[in-house]
Amino acid sequence: MTEPLIRIQGLRKAYGDGTEALKGVDLDIRRGEILALLGPNGAGKTTLINIVCGIVTATEGQVLVEGRNWQEDFRRVRTRIGLVPQELTTDAFESVRATVSFSRGLFGKPRDDAKVEDILRRLTLWDKRKSEMRELSGGMKRRVMIAKALAHEPDILFLDEPTAGVDVELRRDMWDLVRKLRADGTTVILTTHYIEEAEEMADRVGVIRKGELVALGDKNALMAQMGQKTLKVSLDQPLSEIPAGLAEWQLGMEDDGHTLCYRFDSHAERNGIPQLMRRLDELHIGYRDIATRQSSLEDIFVSLIQGEQAA
Ligand SMILES: Nc1ncnc2c1ncn2[C@@H]1O[C@H](COP(=O)(O)OP(=O)(O)OP(=O)(O)O)[C@@H](O)[C@H]1O
C-alpha cells in the first residue's frame, strides 16, 4: 500500500460557541484521485477542507502531507495546495488576468505571464482576460476562482461546492475541466451537494454526517456493496392499501397504488422475490410488468443521512 498523499488523523473541531463541527475524522487521500465529500448542510465538509488548507485550526488531531505534519512545514505545504472556496472572493474592478496573476504572487511565485496565459486558456478565460470581474457571469467568475487557485501551480486542489448555482451545461464543462486536471496529475478533493456530480466524477466518495465520516469507499464498490435493488411491480388494478398478506415484504406503493415497490439486498442468498410473486398470484393480484433497478448513489446517500432527523 503506497503512502497516502494526505493523512487526516483524529480530526476534531469545536468552534468557540461549542458547535462540534468535526468529531474525530480519519481520512487518507490518495495521490492523483478525485475524492468527493458528500454531506448535508452543516455536516462539517467546509470545516474539514478549511483545516487541511490551514484556514481553520483543529481542536485535536493532525494532518500529514507525505508523512510530515504539515503545521510544522506550513509554508512549503501550503504552496502545494490550491483552494477554491465556496464564496466568490474577487475584486470587482480587477481584470481577470490581474486577479490570477496576483494570486500567484501571494504564494511567493515569480511573475510568469506564460503560465498565467496557459491557465487562462485551459479554463477558456483567455478571451476574457481584460474583462473586469464585475462584468463576468456567475459561471465565469467561478472559473476565475479555479484559475486563481491554480495560479501558483499546486498539485492538490480543494474545491468547495464548485458548481453551486451553476447551470447544467457549465457544470458539465466544470466536470471536464476537473477531469483534465486529474489527468495532468492533480489530486482533487471536492465537496458537493449534487450526488450526480460525485457519481460522474469521483474515484472515491466519502459521506460526512454530523461531523463524522459515515462512509468512505471506491465509488463503484460503495454502490455495489451498499446498493440495494428495487423491484417494481406494475399492477393491473390499483390498490388502495397494501394487503395484510404482503406485510412480510414491507412493500412501498407508488403511482397512486398502481405500482408496488420491494427493496431487496441483491447479494442475499434468498431475496424473497419468487415467494412474493407466488403470493401475488395467490391473492389474485394481477400485474403487467416487473422491473428491477440498482439503487443509485443517491439512494445510498439518503439512507446514510436518514438518521439525521431521528438522531
Ligand atoms: N466559524 C464558525 N463558528 C461557529 N460555528 C461554525 C463556524 N463555521 C461553521 N460552523 C458550524 O459548524 C458546523 C459545520 O459547518 P460546515 O460549514 O463545516 O458544514 P458543511 O458541511 O460545509 O455545510 P454546507 O454544505 O452548508 O457548506 C455547522 O453546524 C456550522 O454552523
Image (tube, rainbow, N blue to C red):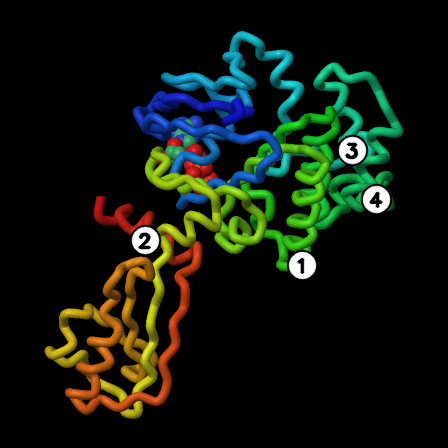
Using residue 153 as the reference point, say whether residue 48 is left or right of it.
left
Which corner quadrant of the image does residue 96 belong to? top right
Which sits in the foreground, 144 or 134? 144
Q: Amino acid at mark 2?
A: Ser
Helix, strand or loop at label 3? It is: loop
Report if the CB atoms under discs 1 and 3 are less than 8 Å apart.
no
Mark 3, residue position = 94
Residue 242 found in image quarter: bottom left
Identify residue for label 2. Answer: 303
The first of marks 2 and 3 along the sequence is 3
Q: In terms of sequence position, does the residue under pointer 4 or pointer 1 come before the other? A: 4
Disc 2 on helix, strand or loop? helix
User: Does label 1 or label 2 sit earlier along the sequence?
Assistant: 1
Q: Residues within 10 Å of mark 2 (few under 14, many from 20)?
A: few
| Distance (Cα) linking label 4 and label 3 | 12 Å
Mark 4, mark 1: which one is toward the viewer? 1
Q: CA distance from mark 4 to mark 1?
A: 19 Å
Is residue 81 shown left or right of residue 19?
A: right
In the rendered structure, which amino acid carries the disc numbered 3?
Glu
Q: Nearer the viewer, residue 76 or 169?
A: 76
- Label number found at residue 128: 4
In the rendered structure, which amino acid carries the disc numbered 1? Glu
Of badges 1 and 3, nearer the viewer stands: 1
Q: Secondary structure at mark 1?
A: helix
Instruction: Between label 1 and label 2, give the one nearer the viewer.
Output: 2
- Please report the residue visible at 27 percent of the width from the left and 88 percent of the height from the top: 238
Q: Position of residue 201 (x, y in %)?
A: 58, 48
Label at residue 191: none
Camera sees residue 58: yes
Q: Earlier in the sequence, mark 4 or mark 2?
A: 4
Q: Is residue 260 above or below residue 61?
A: below
Taking the image as four quarters, which one is ligand 1 found in? top left
